[in-house]
Amino acid sequence: MNMKKSIIYIVMLIAGFGTVDALHAQSGLQMRLGYNPAMPIGTFKDFMGKNSFRGYQGEISYPLSANLRIGLGVSFNDFYEKHPRQLYDTKDGVVSAVVSNSIQSTPILIKANYEFTKAQAIRPYVGLGAGFNLINYNQYFGEFNDGKSAFKPAFAADAGVNIPFNKLTRSAGINLGANFNYQPFKYNELKNLNSWGVHAGVYFPLR
Amino acid sequence: MMMISGLFGLVMIASAGCQKDPLKNLTPAESRIYITNHDSTADFSGFATFSIADSAGIIEDNQGSGKELSSYDAAVIATVTKAMQDRGFQLVDRGDNPDLGITVSRIYNNYTGVVSYPDYWGGYGGFYDPFYWGYGGYDYYDPTYYGAGYYDVYQVTQGALEVDILNLKDAKETNTIKPLWSGMARGTGVFNEANVTNQVSAFFDQSPYLEATR
Protein backbone atom coordinates (compact mmCIF):
# COMPACT_ATOMS: atom_id res chain seq x y z
CA MET A 1 0.00 0.00 0.00
CA ASN A 2 1.43 3.37 -0.90
CA MET A 3 1.27 6.59 1.04
CA LYS A 4 -1.35 8.21 -1.20
CA LYS A 5 -3.75 5.30 -0.74
CA SER A 6 -3.19 5.37 3.01
CA ILE A 7 -3.99 9.06 3.19
CA ILE A 8 -7.12 8.58 1.07
CA TYR A 9 -8.34 5.80 3.39
CA ILE A 10 -7.66 7.90 6.46
CA VAL A 11 -9.48 10.92 5.01
CA MET A 12 -12.46 8.69 4.17
CA LEU A 13 -12.51 7.33 7.69
CA ILE A 14 -12.31 10.81 9.17
CA ALA A 15 -15.15 11.91 6.90
CA GLY A 16 -17.16 8.99 8.28
CA PHE A 17 -16.43 10.01 11.83
CA GLY A 18 -17.40 13.55 10.90
CA THR A 19 -20.90 12.31 10.13
CA VAL A 20 -21.00 10.76 13.57
CA ASP A 21 -19.87 14.10 14.94
CA ALA A 22 -22.88 15.90 13.47
CA LEU A 23 -25.29 13.37 14.91
CA HIS A 24 -23.76 13.22 18.37
CA ALA A 25 -22.50 16.69 19.01
CA GLN A 26 -22.68 16.40 22.78
CA SER A 27 -20.72 13.18 23.00
CA GLY A 28 -18.20 12.13 25.60
CA LEU A 29 -16.08 9.63 23.70
CA GLN A 30 -13.58 11.42 21.49
CA MET A 31 -11.09 10.46 18.83
CA ARG A 32 -7.94 12.35 17.94
CA LEU A 33 -5.96 11.71 14.76
CA GLY A 34 -2.84 13.47 13.70
CA TYR A 35 0.49 13.70 12.00
CA ASN A 36 3.46 13.51 14.36
CA PRO A 37 7.02 13.74 13.09
CA ALA A 38 9.67 12.87 15.66
CA MET A 39 13.26 13.93 16.29
CA PRO A 40 15.69 11.49 17.94
CA ILE A 41 17.57 12.85 20.94
CA GLY A 42 20.50 11.80 23.10
CA THR A 43 22.13 8.48 22.31
CA PHE A 44 19.37 7.64 19.85
CA LYS A 45 20.36 10.71 17.82
CA ASP A 46 23.94 9.39 17.72
CA PHE A 47 22.61 6.25 16.05
CA MET A 48 19.83 7.77 13.97
CA GLY A 49 20.75 11.15 12.51
CA LYS A 50 17.56 11.61 10.52
CA ASN A 51 14.20 12.74 11.87
CA SER A 52 11.07 10.71 11.31
CA PHE A 53 8.66 12.51 9.02
CA ARG A 54 6.63 9.34 8.69
CA GLY A 55 4.69 9.55 11.93
CA TYR A 56 1.00 9.24 12.78
CA GLN A 57 -1.03 9.02 15.92
CA GLY A 58 -4.54 8.16 17.00
CA GLU A 59 -6.20 8.38 20.38
CA ILE A 60 -9.58 7.53 21.85
CA SER A 61 -10.44 9.22 25.14
CA TYR A 62 -13.29 9.46 27.58
CA PRO A 63 -14.00 12.33 30.01
CA LEU A 64 -13.55 11.57 33.70
CA SER A 65 -14.43 15.16 34.56
CA ALA A 66 -14.95 18.43 32.73
CA ASN A 67 -11.20 18.89 32.24
CA LEU A 68 -9.71 15.43 32.53
CA ARG A 69 -9.83 12.72 29.88
CA ILE A 70 -8.34 9.23 29.89
CA GLY A 71 -7.87 7.09 26.86
CA LEU A 72 -5.86 4.80 24.68
CA GLY A 73 -3.34 6.18 22.23
CA VAL A 74 -1.48 4.47 19.39
CA SER A 75 1.24 6.17 17.42
CA PHE A 76 3.75 5.19 14.78
CA ASN A 77 7.11 6.54 13.70
CA ASP A 78 9.36 5.20 10.98
CA PHE A 79 13.03 6.14 11.39
CA TYR A 80 15.37 5.52 8.48
CA GLU A 81 18.91 6.56 7.61
CA LYS A 82 21.30 5.33 4.92
CA HIS A 83 25.01 5.97 5.42
CA PRO A 84 27.44 6.27 2.49
CA ARG A 85 29.76 3.31 1.96
CA GLN A 86 32.45 3.12 4.60
CA LEU A 87 34.63 0.61 6.40
CA TYR A 88 33.56 -1.03 9.64
CA ASP A 89 36.04 -2.89 11.81
CA THR A 90 35.32 -6.42 12.94
CA LYS A 91 37.36 -8.50 15.34
CA ASP A 92 40.00 -9.52 12.79
CA GLY A 93 38.92 -7.72 9.70
CA VAL A 94 36.96 -5.08 7.93
CA VAL A 95 33.58 -4.87 6.24
CA SER A 96 32.95 -2.31 3.51
CA ALA A 97 29.25 -1.57 3.33
CA VAL A 98 26.46 0.90 2.84
CA VAL A 99 24.69 0.66 6.19
CA SER A 100 20.97 1.42 6.44
CA ASN A 101 19.27 1.70 9.79
CA SER A 102 15.51 1.23 9.90
CA ILE A 103 13.43 1.41 13.07
CA GLN A 104 9.68 1.38 13.47
CA SER A 105 8.29 2.42 16.84
CA THR A 106 4.62 1.83 17.67
CA PRO A 107 3.83 2.80 21.27
CA ILE A 108 0.43 1.82 22.64
CA LEU A 109 -0.23 3.98 25.70
CA ILE A 110 -2.88 4.57 28.33
CA LYS A 111 -3.16 8.35 28.32
CA ALA A 112 -4.49 11.09 30.57
CA ASN A 113 -5.00 14.62 29.26
CA TYR A 114 -5.89 17.62 31.39
CA GLU A 115 -7.38 20.66 29.67
CA PHE A 116 -6.86 23.87 31.67
CA THR A 117 -9.98 25.61 30.44
CA LYS A 118 -13.24 24.69 28.70
CA ALA A 119 -14.31 28.27 28.05
CA GLN A 120 -11.68 29.65 25.73
CA ALA A 121 -11.33 29.35 21.97
CA ILE A 122 -7.81 28.05 22.50
CA ARG A 123 -7.56 25.43 25.23
CA PRO A 124 -4.12 24.48 26.54
CA TYR A 125 -3.68 20.98 27.89
CA VAL A 126 -1.02 18.64 29.25
CA GLY A 127 -0.97 14.89 29.01
CA LEU A 128 0.88 11.82 30.22
CA GLY A 129 0.99 8.33 28.78
CA ALA A 130 2.35 4.95 29.83
CA GLY A 131 2.24 1.61 28.10
CA PHE A 132 4.20 -0.58 25.74
CA ASN A 133 6.09 -0.05 22.54
CA LEU A 134 6.20 -2.47 19.63
CA ILE A 135 9.67 -2.01 18.12
CA ASN A 136 10.95 -3.31 14.82
CA TYR A 137 14.71 -2.84 14.35
CA ASN A 138 16.71 -3.62 11.22
CA GLN A 139 20.29 -2.75 10.46
CA TYR A 140 21.32 -3.55 6.90
CA PHE A 141 24.90 -4.06 5.75
CA GLY A 142 24.24 -3.70 2.04
CA GLU A 143 21.26 -5.95 1.55
CA PHE A 144 22.03 -8.18 4.52
CA ASN A 145 20.20 -7.37 7.68
CA ASP A 146 20.32 -7.89 11.38
CA GLY A 147 16.75 -7.64 12.63
CA LYS A 148 15.08 -7.65 16.00
CA SER A 149 11.53 -7.11 17.20
CA ALA A 150 10.76 -6.19 20.78
CA PHE A 151 7.91 -5.19 23.06
CA LYS A 152 9.19 -2.69 25.65
CA PRO A 153 7.71 -0.21 28.14
CA ALA A 154 7.13 3.30 26.86
CA PHE A 155 6.16 6.63 28.37
CA ALA A 156 5.15 9.97 26.88
CA ALA A 157 4.50 13.53 27.99
CA ASP A 158 2.36 15.77 25.83
CA ALA A 159 1.48 19.47 25.88
CA GLY A 160 -0.45 21.55 23.40
CA VAL A 161 -3.66 23.30 22.57
CA ASN A 162 -7.10 22.26 21.38
CA ILE A 163 -8.92 24.74 19.15
CA PRO A 164 -12.64 23.92 18.74
CA PHE A 165 -14.21 24.39 15.30
CA ASN A 166 -17.66 25.37 16.46
CA LYS A 167 -18.67 27.72 19.27
CA LEU A 168 -21.94 25.89 19.91
CA THR A 169 -20.82 22.31 20.19
CA ARG A 170 -17.09 22.73 20.83
CA SER A 171 -16.84 18.99 20.44
CA ALA A 172 -14.52 18.88 17.44
CA GLY A 173 -11.49 20.89 16.55
CA ILE A 174 -7.82 21.12 15.80
CA ASN A 175 -5.11 19.76 18.06
CA LEU A 176 -1.56 21.11 18.05
CA GLY A 177 1.20 20.14 20.43
CA ALA A 178 4.57 18.69 21.24
CA ASN A 179 5.47 15.47 22.97
CA PHE A 180 8.44 13.77 24.59
CA ASN A 181 8.74 10.04 24.05
CA TYR A 182 10.70 7.95 26.54
CA GLN A 183 11.24 4.56 24.91
CA PRO A 184 13.81 2.15 26.39
CA PHE A 185 15.37 -0.32 23.92
CA LYS A 186 18.82 -1.82 24.38
CA TYR A 187 20.34 -3.57 21.39
CA ASN A 188 23.84 -3.32 19.99
CA GLU A 189 24.86 0.32 20.48
CA LEU A 190 21.28 1.49 21.05
CA LYS A 191 20.16 2.31 24.59
CA ASN A 192 16.77 3.85 23.87
CA LEU A 193 14.59 5.36 21.17
CA ASN A 194 13.91 8.64 22.98
CA SER A 195 12.59 11.46 20.84
CA TRP A 196 10.83 14.78 20.73
CA GLY A 197 7.78 15.04 18.55
CA VAL A 198 5.34 17.63 17.34
CA HIS A 199 1.85 16.79 16.30
CA ALA A 200 -1.01 18.39 14.42
CA GLY A 201 -4.39 16.81 13.92
CA VAL A 202 -8.09 16.86 14.49
CA TYR A 203 -10.34 15.64 17.27
CA PHE A 204 -14.01 14.80 17.07
CA PRO A 205 -16.70 13.02 19.10
CA LEU A 206 -17.52 9.39 18.40
CA ARG A 207 -20.94 9.09 20.09
CA MET B 1 -14.03 -2.43 21.33
CA MET B 2 -14.82 -1.57 17.72
CA MET B 3 -13.51 1.93 18.35
CA ILE B 4 -10.22 0.58 19.66
CA SER B 5 -9.92 -1.75 16.69
CA GLY B 6 -10.60 1.18 14.40
CA LEU B 7 -7.91 3.21 16.13
CA PHE B 8 -5.36 0.43 15.70
CA GLY B 9 -6.50 -0.02 12.12
CA LEU B 10 -5.93 3.62 11.29
CA VAL B 11 -2.43 3.67 12.66
CA MET B 12 -1.59 0.33 11.02
CA ILE B 13 -2.80 1.64 7.65
CA ALA B 14 -0.60 4.68 8.08
CA SER B 15 2.40 2.64 9.17
CA ALA B 16 2.11 0.03 6.39
CA GLY B 17 1.83 2.70 3.74
CA CYS B 18 4.50 5.05 4.90
CA GLN B 19 7.39 2.89 6.01
CA LYS B 20 10.54 3.37 3.99
CA ASP B 21 11.77 0.06 2.60
CA PRO B 22 15.58 0.06 2.99
CA LEU B 23 16.10 -2.61 0.31
CA LYS B 24 14.16 -0.67 -2.32
CA ASN B 25 16.34 2.33 -1.57
CA LEU B 26 19.60 0.56 -2.46
CA THR B 27 21.30 0.46 -5.83
CA PRO B 28 22.89 -2.88 -6.80
CA ALA B 29 26.33 -1.40 -6.04
CA GLU B 30 25.12 -0.27 -2.60
CA SER B 31 23.70 -3.72 -1.90
CA ARG B 32 27.12 -5.34 -2.09
CA ILE B 33 29.39 -5.80 0.91
CA TYR B 34 33.09 -6.62 0.94
CA ILE B 35 34.44 -8.52 3.91
CA THR B 36 38.13 -9.07 4.51
CA ASN B 37 39.65 -11.00 7.37
CA HIS B 38 43.23 -11.86 8.09
CA ASP B 39 45.51 -13.49 10.56
CA SER B 40 46.54 -10.44 12.54
CA THR B 41 49.83 -12.08 13.50
CA ALA B 42 50.88 -12.54 9.87
CA ASP B 43 53.56 -10.28 8.42
CA PHE B 44 53.04 -10.23 4.68
CA SER B 45 56.36 -8.57 4.09
CA GLY B 46 57.89 -11.96 4.83
CA PHE B 47 56.32 -13.44 1.69
CA ALA B 48 57.62 -12.75 -1.78
CA THR B 49 56.01 -15.11 -4.28
CA PHE B 50 52.55 -16.42 -4.98
CA SER B 51 50.68 -18.76 -7.25
CA ILE B 52 46.97 -18.59 -8.03
CA ALA B 53 44.66 -21.51 -8.82
CA ASP B 54 43.82 -21.85 -12.51
CA SER B 55 40.06 -22.17 -11.99
CA ALA B 56 37.38 -21.34 -9.44
CA GLY B 57 36.06 -23.76 -6.87
CA ILE B 58 32.28 -24.02 -6.75
CA ILE B 59 30.73 -24.44 -3.32
CA GLU B 60 27.02 -25.23 -3.15
CA ASP B 61 25.20 -25.59 0.16
CA ASN B 62 28.56 -25.86 1.87
CA GLN B 63 29.52 -28.78 -0.33
CA GLY B 64 32.03 -28.62 -3.12
CA SER B 65 30.61 -29.37 -6.52
CA GLY B 66 33.53 -28.92 -8.88
CA LYS B 67 35.85 -26.45 -10.53
CA GLU B 68 34.97 -24.12 -13.34
CA LEU B 69 36.66 -21.49 -15.43
CA SER B 70 33.99 -19.12 -16.74
CA SER B 71 34.93 -15.75 -18.22
CA TYR B 72 33.94 -14.30 -14.83
CA ASP B 73 36.31 -16.67 -13.01
CA ALA B 74 39.10 -15.83 -15.42
CA ALA B 75 38.51 -12.12 -14.87
CA VAL B 76 38.71 -12.56 -11.09
CA ILE B 77 41.90 -14.62 -11.34
CA ALA B 78 43.51 -12.08 -13.66
CA THR B 79 42.46 -9.09 -11.54
CA VAL B 80 43.64 -10.66 -8.28
CA THR B 81 46.93 -11.61 -9.95
CA LYS B 82 47.50 -8.02 -11.07
CA ALA B 83 46.54 -6.64 -7.65
CA MET B 84 49.05 -8.95 -5.95
CA GLN B 85 51.77 -7.94 -8.41
CA ASP B 86 50.96 -4.28 -7.79
CA ARG B 87 51.54 -4.96 -4.08
CA GLY B 88 55.00 -6.31 -4.81
CA PHE B 89 54.41 -10.07 -4.89
CA GLN B 90 55.93 -12.11 -7.69
CA LEU B 91 53.79 -14.58 -9.62
CA VAL B 92 55.46 -17.99 -9.94
CA ASP B 93 54.35 -21.36 -11.18
CA ARG B 94 52.61 -23.64 -8.77
CA GLY B 95 55.55 -26.01 -8.90
CA ASP B 96 58.13 -23.36 -8.00
CA ASN B 97 57.49 -23.38 -4.25
CA PRO B 98 55.36 -20.23 -3.99
CA ASP B 99 55.20 -18.58 -0.58
CA LEU B 100 51.50 -17.94 -0.95
CA GLY B 101 48.71 -19.90 -2.61
CA ILE B 102 45.58 -18.07 -3.78
CA THR B 103 42.23 -19.67 -4.49
CA VAL B 104 39.05 -18.21 -5.95
CA SER B 105 35.67 -19.70 -5.10
CA ARG B 106 32.08 -19.07 -5.97
CA ILE B 107 29.77 -19.96 -3.10
CA TYR B 108 26.08 -20.69 -3.55
CA ASN B 109 24.02 -21.42 -0.51
CA ASN B 110 20.45 -21.86 -1.53
CA TYR B 111 18.86 -21.65 1.87
CA THR B 112 18.07 -18.77 4.11
CA GLY B 113 20.19 -19.22 7.14
CA VAL B 114 23.67 -18.42 8.14
CA VAL B 115 26.93 -19.58 6.68
CA SER B 116 30.05 -19.36 8.71
CA TYR B 117 33.45 -19.51 7.22
CA PRO B 118 34.37 -22.79 8.93
CA ASP B 119 31.39 -24.45 7.22
CA TYR B 120 32.58 -23.17 3.90
CA TRP B 121 36.10 -24.22 4.71
CA GLY B 122 34.84 -27.75 5.32
CA GLY B 123 33.93 -28.03 1.65
CA TYR B 124 37.03 -26.28 0.51
CA GLY B 125 39.70 -28.92 0.76
CA GLY B 126 37.94 -31.16 -1.71
CA PHE B 127 38.91 -28.91 -4.58
CA TYR B 128 42.23 -27.52 -3.79
CA ASP B 129 43.45 -30.30 -1.60
CA PRO B 130 46.96 -30.07 -0.28
CA PHE B 131 48.17 -32.14 -3.25
CA TYR B 132 47.24 -29.24 -5.52
CA TRP B 133 49.93 -27.16 -3.88
CA GLY B 134 52.39 -30.01 -3.68
CA TYR B 135 51.85 -30.67 0.01
CA GLY B 136 50.21 -34.07 -0.06
CA GLY B 137 49.40 -35.44 3.36
CA TYR B 138 49.21 -32.01 4.97
CA ASP B 139 46.05 -30.67 6.54
CA TYR B 140 44.33 -27.37 5.99
CA TYR B 141 44.24 -25.45 9.18
CA ASP B 142 40.92 -25.18 10.99
CA PRO B 143 39.94 -21.51 10.72
CA THR B 144 38.22 -21.72 14.10
CA TYR B 145 41.77 -21.47 15.44
CA TYR B 146 41.32 -17.74 15.10
CA GLY B 147 38.26 -17.76 17.30
CA ALA B 148 34.57 -17.67 16.58
CA GLY B 149 34.71 -14.00 15.63
CA TYR B 150 37.38 -14.41 13.00
CA TYR B 151 34.85 -14.93 10.31
CA ASP B 152 31.66 -12.98 10.56
CA VAL B 153 28.35 -14.62 10.06
CA TYR B 154 25.83 -13.18 7.66
CA GLN B 155 22.45 -14.25 6.51
CA VAL B 156 22.69 -15.82 3.10
CA THR B 157 20.30 -15.00 0.33
CA GLN B 158 22.66 -15.06 -2.63
CA GLY B 159 26.02 -16.26 -3.75
CA ALA B 160 29.39 -14.99 -2.68
CA LEU B 161 32.78 -14.55 -4.26
CA GLU B 162 35.59 -15.71 -2.02
CA VAL B 163 39.31 -15.18 -2.51
CA ASP B 164 41.68 -16.85 -0.06
CA ILE B 165 45.40 -16.49 0.49
CA LEU B 166 47.11 -19.48 2.06
CA ASN B 167 50.46 -19.77 3.76
CA LEU B 168 52.51 -22.30 1.77
CA LYS B 169 55.87 -20.98 2.90
CA ASP B 170 55.46 -22.25 6.46
CA ALA B 171 53.44 -25.34 5.57
CA LYS B 172 56.43 -27.67 5.90
CA GLU B 173 57.29 -26.36 9.33
CA THR B 174 53.77 -26.53 10.72
CA ASN B 175 52.61 -29.49 8.64
CA THR B 176 49.46 -27.50 7.87
CA ILE B 177 48.32 -25.01 5.26
CA LYS B 178 47.04 -22.03 7.20
CA PRO B 179 44.77 -19.35 5.76
CA LEU B 180 46.28 -15.89 6.05
CA TRP B 181 43.66 -13.71 4.42
CA SER B 182 40.20 -13.97 2.93
CA GLY B 183 38.08 -11.58 0.93
CA MET B 184 34.38 -12.13 0.40
CA ALA B 185 32.00 -10.14 -1.80
CA ARG B 186 28.26 -10.57 -1.45
CA GLY B 187 25.16 -8.86 -2.75
CA THR B 188 23.30 -8.12 -5.95
CA GLY B 189 25.43 -8.48 -9.08
CA VAL B 190 28.35 -10.06 -7.28
CA PHE B 191 28.83 -12.52 -10.17
CA ASN B 192 28.55 -9.84 -12.83
CA GLU B 193 31.83 -9.69 -14.72
CA ALA B 194 31.56 -5.91 -15.02
CA ASN B 195 31.87 -5.64 -11.23
CA VAL B 196 35.02 -7.75 -10.85
CA THR B 197 37.49 -4.84 -10.88
CA ASN B 198 35.57 -2.90 -8.23
CA GLN B 199 35.21 -5.96 -6.04
CA VAL B 200 38.86 -6.94 -6.13
CA SER B 201 39.88 -3.30 -5.66
CA ALA B 202 37.68 -3.15 -2.55
CA PHE B 203 39.41 -6.24 -1.15
CA PHE B 204 42.86 -4.78 -1.57
CA ASP B 205 41.97 -1.17 -0.69
CA GLN B 206 40.75 -2.30 2.72
CA SER B 207 43.83 -4.52 3.25
CA PRO B 208 46.78 -2.11 3.17
CA TYR B 209 48.92 -4.57 5.17
CA LEU B 210 48.83 -6.96 2.20
CA GLU B 211 52.14 -5.90 0.73
CA ALA B 212 55.45 -7.60 0.02
CA THR B 213 58.82 -6.07 0.84
CA ARG B 214 59.92 -4.32 -2.33
Image (cartoon, rainbow, N blue to C red):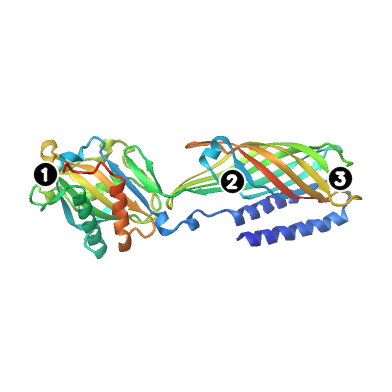
In the depicted view, which residue is nearer to us: A182 or B88?
B88
- Mark 3 sits on what residue? A121
Q: Is residue A109 left or right of residue B162?
A: right
Q: Do the residues under discs 2 and 3 have CB atoms within 8 angstroms?
A: no
Chain letter for the residue marked with disc 2 in the picture? A
Q: Nearer the viewer, residue B199 or B163?
A: B199
SS label for mark 1: loop
Give above or below for A205 relative to A132. Answer: below
Residue A54 visible (yes or no)? yes
Q: Is residue A10 above or below residue A44?
A: below
2 and 3 marks on the same chain: yes
The three-letter code of the residue at mark 2 reads Asn
Whether the residues at callouts 3 and 1 have beta carbons within 8 Å, the answer is no
Which amino acid does the dot numbered 3 rest on?
A: Ala
Total tally of numbered discs in the picture:
3
Q: Amino acid at mark 1?
A: Gly
Residue, disc 1? B137
Report the residue that reaches farthest toward the front.
B214
Residue linked to disc 2: A51
Please, is residue B1 above or below residue B147 in the view? below
Q: Position of residue A187 (x, y in %)?
A: 50, 37
- Farthest residue to the right: give it: A168
- Picture quarter containing residue A92? top left
Q: Position of residue B175 (x, y in %)?
A: 13, 38
Percent of width and height locating residue B17: 61, 57
Left or right: A184 in relation to B163: right
